[in-house]
Amino acid sequence: MAGSRESLNRFYVLIGAVLVVGVGALVWMSSRPEGPTSVPVATAIQPADTAGFAGYALGPESAPVTIVEFADYQCPACQSFEMVEFPYVRERLVQSGRVRFVYKDFPLNQHQWSRLASHAAACANDQGKFWELHEAIYRTQPEWSVARNAGARFRELAQQAGVDLAAYDACMSSLRYAGRISAMAAEGIRLGVGSTPTFLIGNRLYTGVQSYDRLRALVDSLSPAAPTP
Amino acid sequence: MTLRMGAALVALAGVLVSAYLWLYKVGVIGTLACGSGGCETVQLSPYSRFLGIEVALIGLLGYVGLLGLALLSLQPRFAAARWPVTALAVLSGAGLVFTLYLKYLELFVIGAICRWCVVSAVLIALFFLISLLEYRRVRRVTA
């Protein structure tokens, strides 16, 4: 039964009021601050930024070969390496003790969220969850790279990775690792890194995604004693 | 308040809930007030898209359609017309079936429950129920 004109008008007022309140709530939620949305590029690098830090490392220091990867979280090629090749590298080269794998940030300035992703991973590292968040950030790259506030996504991924959010939020707000990220990028530039991913193996740079087979062959050539399957 | 008005209000609630999920999905809203973390798991899963389209967007468009139709059905000239209520019942029935499929995915494939998706499921079920009651009423009146 359609109501009378008067009750219909009252209903339209009700619908309008609900709509205004609802849209207002959505606008308020979309404008809430969600922590830092960027990490400054031009950060003065202090000695403390890199003191006792030589990259995010996996594998024993005594490993005969060290692979250093300079990468950018928002770079699709880096994601390809992380998702396709790195699991084999980790399982067959790192866990066997033949390789020490070191990840270093090399955020490219054309990527809006790279430094923020690097900073999120650095904050997770404070809680021993670097590799968990590192993997999650790369895995969800297609999602957050087009987001308007990727920082909120990183926070959720951190939560899912088991990171304590209170400490994470404090770390992110402080931007305490901005200098360290810049230091890693500066180191890459000094070494001749110009694109991502770039791998430093021995004293040579290898640019672009390196397959597991290629890396294994390189490792075998540098430490031929125990060839890897 | 008539059943049709109730249907319009439920559809409006659905518009707001699905808009909330869609704005989150496209990154306009940073975090979902979910409590369990299940919302993010569901929203970031591959199943948050259906045929390449965001499920939240499908929900938003669906609810907007239902809201428009429900408001149209309120016009006095459609008071005794069957087609608006038939359309409401058919469209919301299709929405309910799609929602049940999504609930199956959440429970048995993704393994996480998104509370806002549950709210949306309750709303579409309620809308379907209201449209069935209204359909029965109109049939009785016009018989």
Image (cartoon, coloured by chain):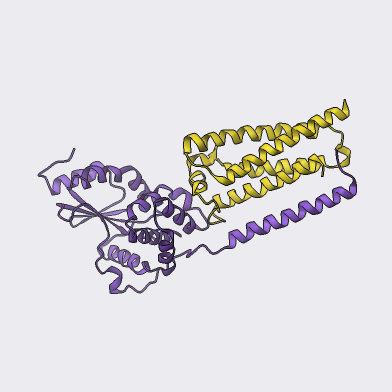
Q: Residue furthest top?
A: B143
Query: Where A91 sits versus B129, above or below?
Result: below
Q: Colour of chain B?
A: yellow
A153 sits to left or right of A205: right
Q: Residue at x 88, y 41 (%)?
A: B76
Q: Nearer the viewer, residue B10 or B95?
A: B10
A183 sits to left or right of B66: left
Q: Quick check: can you spot residue B68?
A: no
Q: Residue B110, percent across and down?
A: 47, 38
Q: Nearer the viewer, residue A203 or A85?
A: A85
Query: Where B52 sits versus A153, above or below?
Result: above
Q: Quadrant of the N terminus of chain A?
A: top right
Q: Colour of chain A?
A: purple
Q: How many marks?
A: 0
A73 sits to left or right of B101: left
Q: Quick check: can you spot residue B38?
A: yes
Q: Quadrant of the C terminus of chain A?
A: top left
Q: Residue A192, percent across and down?
A: 27, 62
Q: Residue at x 54, y 53 (%)?
A: B32
Q: Residue A161, percent across and down?
A: 39, 51
Q: Residue at x 72, y 54 (%)?
A: A19
Q: Residue A60, percent across and down?
A: 19, 53
Q: Nearer the viewer, residue B45 or B115?
A: B115
Q: Residue at x 61, y 51 (%)?
A: B20
Q: Nearer the viewer, residue A161 or B45?
A: A161
